[in-house]
Amino acid sequence: MGILYGIMALGIYITFRVLKVSDLTVDGSFATGGAVSVMLMLSGVSPILSLLCAFAVGLLCGTVTGLLHTKLSIPIILSSILVQIGLYSINLRILQGSALKSISVDKYPLLINVRFVSRTILIGALIALALIAVLYWYFGTEQGCSIRATGNNPAMAKSNGINTSTTTLIGLALCNGLVAFAGGLMSQYQGFADVNQGRGAIVTGLAAIIIGEVLCDIFFKKGSSFWLRLTFVIIGGIIYYLIMVLILWMRVDSNDLKLFTALIVAIFLAIPNFRKGAAV
Amino acid sequence: MLKISNIFKTFNKGTVNEKVAISGLSLTLNDGDFVTVIGSNGAGKSTLLNAIAGTWLTDSGKIEIDDIDITRLPEHKRASYIGRVFQDPLMGTASDMWIEENLALASRRGQKRHLLPGITKAERTHYAELLKPLNLGLENRLTTKVGLLSGGQRQALTLLMATIKKPRLLLLDEHTAALDPATADKVLSVTDELVRRDNLTTLMITHNMQDAIDYGNRLIMMNEGRIILDISGQEKKQLTKQQLIDRFNSLSDQKLESDNVLLS
């Protein structure tokens, strides 16, 4: 489950760290991915194909946010909230009106599931590695570089002939594609798709990214390579999950879980600043 | 090659902060012209460069490069004709990316960006050779993040990026103003070298009158969104600072005692 958080966080990394924008669409598209995947499998589509469809639908969600931003000049944070809210209804439609649709691991050949943990970890790790490799390759290409430049310095990007609207759009689409893909994996793992599955996805993703970065900075020097940082995003996802398990194990009321999530993210956000302060 | 006809630009139209930045400006540049631009603060110098580069669109008038109408073209499309260095050394480069990645981005200006590798081996060697003459030691630091460079190094790099793919027009917006005097001199001489080598048509804004006289073959002075003086050829070569100040005083209603105002 931690690995799945990590995979979702890889998507969020694209918008949050590469494009340097906050995209809240993910809270919606994570659930959309789960819903699409489960509904397709229930109608007989293979689990792998259903994940690819989830990815495609995620691309579409990100594109809508991107178009609202680039064509209608609505700030990204607002347009992503609008899409997120809209997706809630769409997700209910996809799930045919029910808030929860379960899929039995006995009747369908699910890729991963709580039932077989070791296989889930193996497949999850393989998918994560493959995604890191693909992202590493992609952000080294001409197109990937132009997305990085857009996030880094839009004025420079434009004056070097980069259409920053297009690159922002691509980045948002990719982010949500990956998040929806992770959402599909999550619903296979849990054995159901839940319309509320995506609630707090952005915070979970940020937690994974930030925990990963803090650890990466501690173990390796600053400015470590891109693939290492991506690997640590996955590790961050796992650690975030372990912390959550620990908190539940300490018999904390599960209703308070979100509060602890917020606290943990706040703590990890503050750590780099403390470290800086100590160095001065 | 550049033809600007009667352009206007007003900021914050209809508000108390309304500011006419450019009012009815026309300018024609010939191939290979190296023009220095001077004028007091608020004269519209940077506005002129932004109008040409397409940072925003002008209210009216027409801008052409090589008889192609670019008046309504977005900034990233004009970039295939234009190389640009900003006043702020942070503006012209991507600080989290390597030196070689920045150069690779610039050398793909005006091209479609595909899924090919962002930088090739051959390019790396080429970039090292281009950086060597700058004498800043950057050729050995190709995989250093640009954010770790000094302002002067960043401006020199931006200059190289602006000219790496020979632009039809080079726009320099006080690109040495934020540097210490020694570094500024160095960057200026690199500028002069590059412009001469490729015979680049160039517009260079400067706050330093002496530089405006020393560099280029043509000098224009701006005031209140218009060009009030345009000197070139032999007359420009013999120009002195005092003459410039006198000309400014007689042409504008503002009075200058020395070049202090222009320098500030």
Image (cartoon, helix red, strand yellow):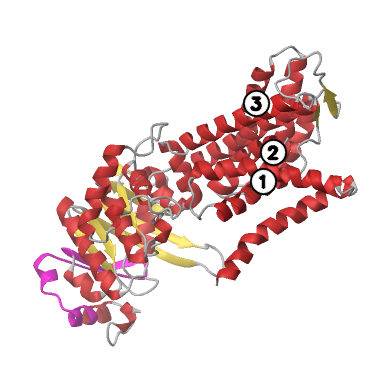
Q: Which residue has dot 1 on it? A: A208
Locate residue B107 relative to residue B230 in the image: left or right: right
Magenta-highlighted residues: B216-245
Is residue B5 left or right of A164 when viewed as pictured? left
Give me the chain letter of mark 3: A
Q: Quadrant of residue A82?
A: top right
Instruction: Locate the N terminus of chain A and report the quarter of the image it occupies.
Output: top right
Q: Name the one closer to the observer, A160 or A212.
A: A212
Q: For this rendering, which residue is in front, B50 or B165?
A: B165
How far separated are the C-alphas under marks 1 and 3?
20 Å
Inspect this view and state whether residue B66 appears: no
Does the CB distance between marks 2 and 3 fall below 8 Å?
A: no
- The location of residue A33, given as percent across then percent down, is 70, 29
Q: Which residue is mark 2?
A: A5
**Callout 2: helix, strand or loop?**
helix
- Residue A123, which numbered label? 3
**Residue B108 sits above or below residue B224 on the image:** above
Q: Does the stretch in magenta take in A66?
A: no
Whether the residues at callouts 1 and 2 have beta carbons within 8 Å, the answer is: yes
Label 1 is placed on what type of residue?
Ala
Q: Position of residue A88 (x, y in %)?
A: 78, 35
